[in-house]
Image (cartoon, coloured by chain):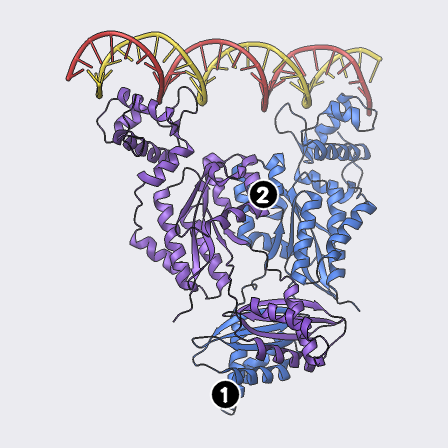
Chain colours: A purple, B blue, C yellow, D red
Amino acid sequence: MIRNTAETGLNERAQHLLKALVEHYIRDGEPVGSRTLSRDSGLDLSPASIRNVMSDLEELGFIAAPHTSAGRVPTVKGYRFFVDTLLAVKPLEQQEVRLIQQQLASNDPNPHALLSSASSMLSAITHMTGVVTLPRREHIAWRHIEFLPLSDNRVLAILVVNEGEVQNRILHLDRSYDSIALQQIGNYLNTHFAGKDIHRVRAELLSELRRTRESMNNLMMAAITMAEKVFATRGQESGRSYVMAGETNLMEWAELSDVEKLRRLFEAFNQQRDILHLLDKCIVADGVQIFIGEESGYRVLDECSVVTAPYSVGDEVVGVLGVIGPTRMAYERVIPIVDLTAKLLSAALNPRK
Amino acid sequence: MIRNTAETGLNERAQHLLKALVEHYIRDGEPVGSRTLSRDSGLDLSPASIRNVMSDLEELGFIAAPHTSAGRVPTVKGYRFFVDTLLAVKPLEQQEVRLIQQQLASNDPNPHALLSSASSMLSAITHMTGVVTLPRREHIAWRHIEFLPLSDNRVLAILVVNEGEVQNRILHLDRSYDSIALQQIGNYLNTHFAGKDIHRVRAELLSELRRTRESMNNLMMAAITMAEKVFATRGQESGRSYVMAGETNLMEWAELSDVEKLRRLFEAFNQQRDILHLLDKCIVADGVQIFIGEESGYRVLDECSVVTAPYSVGDEVVGVLGVIGPTRMAYERVIPIVDLTAKLLSAALNPRK
DNA sequence: TTTTAGCACTCGCTTATTGTGAGTGCCAAG
DNA sequence: CTTGGCACTCACAATAAGCGAGTGCTAAAA
């Protein structure tokens, strides 16, 4: 029997060997045996001794043998212990830091483009799939609205919020308005609401609409109805979603090179739903978070790990970004990359002071 | 030796057998032999006779044997002859027509959403990959422009063209303007250019800029410089591109179930370049166009066929839509589907009179 | 008590061997 | 011109043999 160290349940030697085993497996992707460990673990032990330890580790559920006479492979529990207490996160090379900085800085400051390039960058640098959720901002400031007449009682509404984010909707109205009327309506709304939070605006609109239904003049009435219609119409970019890049990278990993598996995975990426739920969970944590294999709770991701970190605008966490790849990814590299990217993205998104 | 019918190079029997063979292969995906054809071709011939004909067809390059003792499969030349002269295009079921109509009608009239849903619909109905190029319109009418000040000498420009298509750019200027100045600049441009073709506008801007550099007043100068900047900055949706849907469907086809092949194909989809060149070629043809296997000229598509049809707005052909799938697709179904979709999309995009 | 050498045993892979069957080409008779 | 017959080819599946990496157990060495 193994002699436990009280807290961890594993004595030092066992931990050292587990670490060596996981690292080896991550590097080569093949079950690792006692001989290999005896050679490469740094400990001066014979294969036989190592076999004893491995036997214990297996019994405790940290490693498993794919079949009777292969080496051992880390289990989810093994990976978990590895990343939680054994992993020595490798600080990034200066060169890599600069690379990430460039990618996030060079591009135009349009927020959506920034997210895309963060996603591409993550995918390119890790050779896995990068993902960035679109920011959900609690606070959205009304900036400016503009109405343009189209044919058939339709009106194009252009709403600018925050720093230059443009949304546009087509409204179907029951009568037509000429440009001048629309201009007046726009002016009225802009003078009243500019700078206010958009949720507050909506609340005000609704109460206003109920309260003073008769006592209003025509212009105000039209303005408020129309603004309310803008909020009622879902913009096409609404529905919290994410940007993904490098899905095809996953095809290069041997453990995922089964078409059926890939199909299901890509299907899940397209569905967005499950992935989004998972990412939404990470928004509460305040640092890098890691889901290993089945920990995610979604069957399609059983052989994948997800490394995420939230990013923020101002003091408010607004989204999550990360990397999806095979369980056997190089955590010690991926973790700092995701961490740094989240920090730099936050910095890039924050209004310069 | 075979007795040729003068024009085609193939006598009737040979054509009939080729047709039966191709149809059979498209249905089952397996090389078809003389016995099978003898049973199912409708002709009352023994396998031996059929072997003679097949031997001739092989010599002429219409079919080939994957190896000495398998059946025959159509070559590209065989498919070509099949679709050109043998194929009986099956008219669509009423039900299918209605399905396509619904998909294209029900959605909101936002043009981009329409293209997306056309693409998804093609993919869903054919179980292959649907693709729709974004329309390139020769004639783009300036509708309205609006400038909003941002921080740091940056200005958000919102340009509306045609019927409610909104583009927005962020301009970096060398000095800052307040809202009132920007408003004036916008007004100036709108009164001068509203309704004009955007290429004409640009030409005018440039010549104006050169000609009257000194004689202009400040406002005009600023206005023209700024408008020119709008055109010089590429909007993020610019760069002719396409919408694709159902890429993952291709994973379900046996002949493409090789990860390496798929990876290259998906890579090509992501690159966009090659696919776009191919689709651009189709914009000149005025009906359904078909590329079989290597005919496309792009190696990645060697085992795929592409069926396309152009669609138009007004009298002008503005884009191409189609389907990408394995060479062995059900052409007699896909062709009318692509054809109809292009027609209905054109109808949906045309301004209602 | 811990470590290690030795040994028998397992079991997944690779390679070779052998059928099997679908399909072909050719020939000679109908 | 068509067809039955026949020898032949060749991918594919099934079976067997050998290899090798790895294991568990035991008994001796440290």
Residue A181 or residue A47, whichever sits in front: A181
Tell me how far mark 2 sits from mark 1, CA to CA.
57 Å
Decide: is A343 above or below A152.
above
Residue B116 figure quarter:
bottom right
Q: Which residue lies furthest to the front in this view?
A: A211
Residue sitting at x 33%, y 33%? A24
Circle 2 is placed at which residue position? Answer: A267
Q: Where residue A53 appears, x then y in whole percent?
A: 30, 24
Residue C20 or residue B135, whichever sits in front: B135
Decide: is A346 above or below B143.
above
Secondary structure at numbered mark 1: loop
Secondary structure at numbered mark 2: helix
What crowding class fits label 1: few (fewer than 14 Cα within 10 Å), some (14-19), or many (20 or more)?
few
What crowding class fits label 2: few (fewer than 14 Cα within 10 Å), some (14-19), or many (20 or more)?
some
Decide: is B254 above or below B204.
above
Q: Where residue B80 appears, x then y in whole percent?
A: 70, 42
Circle 1 is placed at which residue position? Answer: B213
Under mark 2, the amino acid is: Glu
Q: Name the chain letter of the residue that bears numbered label 1.
A: B
- Which disc, if any, is residue A92? none
Total labels: the figure holds: 2
Under mark 1, the amino acid is: Arg
Decide: is B41 above or below B270.
above
Residue sitting at x 76%, y 42%? B332
Q: Do the residues labelled 2 and 1 touch (CB within 8 Å)?
A: no
Q: Is residue B92 visible?
A: no
Q: Name the chain letter of the residue that bears numbered label 2.
A: A
